[in-house]
Structures are given as C-alpha cells and as structure tokens.
Amino acid sequence: RAASSVSRLVKRLEFLFELPMRLKQCIELNAHAQAVKYYTKANLVLRQYNHMPSFEKVWLQCDTL
C-alpha cells in the first residue's frame, strides 16, 4: 500500500513538473481545450504551493505561455 501511495505521488509530481511542456505542446497543436484541462487540474496545487521555489517556477512558466 505504501508503495502505491508513493507511486501515485510521484506520478502527480511528474505531471506538475511536465506541465509547462504539455501546455506548450497543446498550444502548438491548437489543442486549447486540453491545455485548459491540464492547467485547471494543476492550478490549485501550484497556487497552494507557489511559495516553494520548484512549484513557483512551474507556476510562472505556465503563466507565461
């Protein structure tokens, strides 16, 4: 059980740190609805933890796209 919890956490963190790249790809492909879906999914967490440098960097990268 602990391993599956850690695995889920790692997947969520990977999603967050890959978000700027995903958004950029969606924009290039004119997949704006998918970009909004990704951003909406991550925005609450990024805003909640933007006081942490790693999350702040991701949040700022996403907001500049």
Image (cartoon, rainbow, N blue to C red):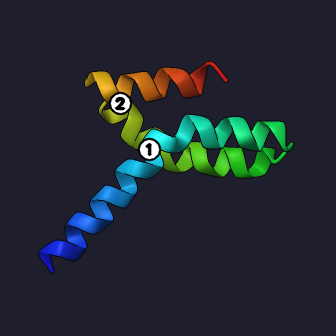
The kind of residue on which mark 1 rests is Leu
Displayed quadrant of residue 17: top left
Displayed quadrant of residue 16: top left
> Which residue carries the number 1 mark?
16
Please indicate, yes or no, whether residue 50 appears anywhere in the rendered image: no
Q: Secondary structure at mark 2?
A: helix
Displayed quadrant of residue 46: top left
Q: Which mark is residue 55?
A: 2
- Looking at the image, is 45 positioned above or below residue 12? above
Going 15% across and 81% down the picture, which residue do you hit? 1
Q: Residues within 10 Å of mark 1 (few under 14, many from 20)?
A: many
Q: Secondary structure at mark 1?
A: helix
Residue in front for this viewpoint, 11 or 44: 11
Residue in front for this viewpoint, 44 or 64: 64
**Residue 5 spot, x, y in % from top left:** 22, 70
Going 82% across and 37% down the picture, which residue do you hit? 28
Residue 39 as seen in the image, left or right of residue 7: right
First along the sequence among labels 2 and 1: 1
- Looking at the image, is 29 positioned above or below residue 60? below
Distance (Cα) linking label 2 and label 1: 8 Å
Residue that lies at the very extreme toward the right in this rendered image? 30
Going 35% across and 30% down the picture, which residue do you hit? 55
The kind of residue on which mark 2 rests is Phe
- Looking at the image, is 62 positioned above or below residue 13? above
**Residue 37 spot, x, y in % from top left:** 64, 51
Q: Which mark is residue 52?
A: none
Q: Residues within 10 Å of mark 2 (few under 14, many from 20)?
A: some
Going 49% across and 20% down the picture, which residue do you hit? 60
Proximity of marks 2 and 1: CB atoms separated by less than 8 Å: yes
**Residue 22 spot, x, y in % from top left:** 63, 43
